[in-house]
Amino acid sequence: MQEDNSIGIVAPQIAHFDTPLALKCGKVLPQFDLVFETYGTLNASRSNAVLICHALSGNHHVAGKYSENDKYPGWWDNLIGPGKPLDTNQFFVIGLNNLGGCHGSTGPKSMRPDSNKPWGADFPIVTVEDWVNSQARLLDYLGITKLAAVVGGSLGGMQALEWTITYPDRVDHALVIASAPNLTAQNMAFNEVARQAIITDPEFYGGNYYEHQAVPRRGLRIARMLGHITYLSDDVMGEKFGRKLRDQIKYSFDVEFEMESYLRYQGDKFAGEFDANTYIRMTRALDYYDPALRYGGDLTQALSGTKAKFLVLSFTSDWRFSPARSREIVKALLDNERNVSYAEITAAHGHDAFLMPDQHYHAILRNYISNITTGDDYAK
């Protein structure tokens, strides 16, 4: 099939859970919903399922479109579909919006079960471990005992890694892309600046802005602008924008350069789509994740109980999650004599490279995924 074939028209589904979920922070969610989408067909032995874990601002809409006129397919549509590297003629692919999200899963703007008000600032801080536990509940709901693979980039890669630690018997393969075993101090600093931009916005109201019919747009805009700077490489910024002026120099603080116009556009767009309480919680989950912390800082020991086979990918121009961080994961896995493949891909797009349809990158994914067996005839 052609590489650009889409999965077609898709629709989200909702799974409701009444069994309480204990969170790492010590609090308990009495009930919750997870919004998800599926692509392809689950085979007879339910052994061809692949879970996609999303990054910071991602969601359940991973592939396909919601209508024929939909201009924006799912965020990883270039990877997932008939004949694509993750072939939905062979695999049953699941995408979900994480707990605490703002695209339908239970989160800060959801109504509390004990009142007629949104959770707001009272919604607990959730962690990567909490997400993986809630994802396991979703697999139970779907009747899937074991994943053929779990796949994630960036924060999604951390979730994929955690799956192999928490549920080693439920994962055959883990694809950890443009990720790290924990954040560097610099990355944590970027997250704190982004959070402070939101928290100090006068329209934030301590996280209870819903009750004031307000949105901390200024803070969200700045947070997203900062994020975009870190997601792109200097080369891509230079090639795409350089020092191009929009018009003649006006000697003002208005938009003068194309780069400024781009950042403001991205900030405005994001502020109109994303929830501030979700954003600050997602960045906190990034900060807290560190599986080695449970083992005195020893990542090798942290990964000693894993059983999955691994593909770890990094990108040369990614300075936010550098190749050196991926190699830490690879070393810890090799120390444990695990089956791990690693590739460092030459790409110019910085951290965002994991979302791009790079030919070499997709060829590596296609080759690895095509060798994943499910123990059953592939779904036709």
Image: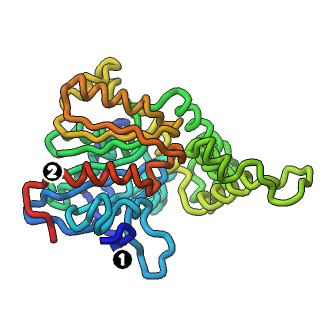
Residue shown at 46% from the left, 31% from the top: 183
Assign a secondary structure to mark 1: loop
How far across and how far down the image is residue 153, in percent? 40, 46
Image disc number at residue 9: 1
**Farthest residue toward the right?**
251
- State the separation of the CA atoms marked 2 and 1: 27 Å
Quadrant of the rendering where the N terminus is positioned? bottom left
Q: Does the rendering let one see residue 51?
A: yes
Residue on which the image places disc 2: 146
Indicate whether 359 appears above or below 300: below
Along the horizontal axis of the image, is 279 left or right of 324? right
Quadrant of the rendering where the C terminus is positioned? bottom left
Tell me which corner region of the image, top left, top right, bottom left or bottom right, holds residue 175: top left
Indicate whether 78 appears above or below 158: below
How far across and how far down the image is residue 66, in percent? 41, 75
Foreground pick, 231 / 301: 231
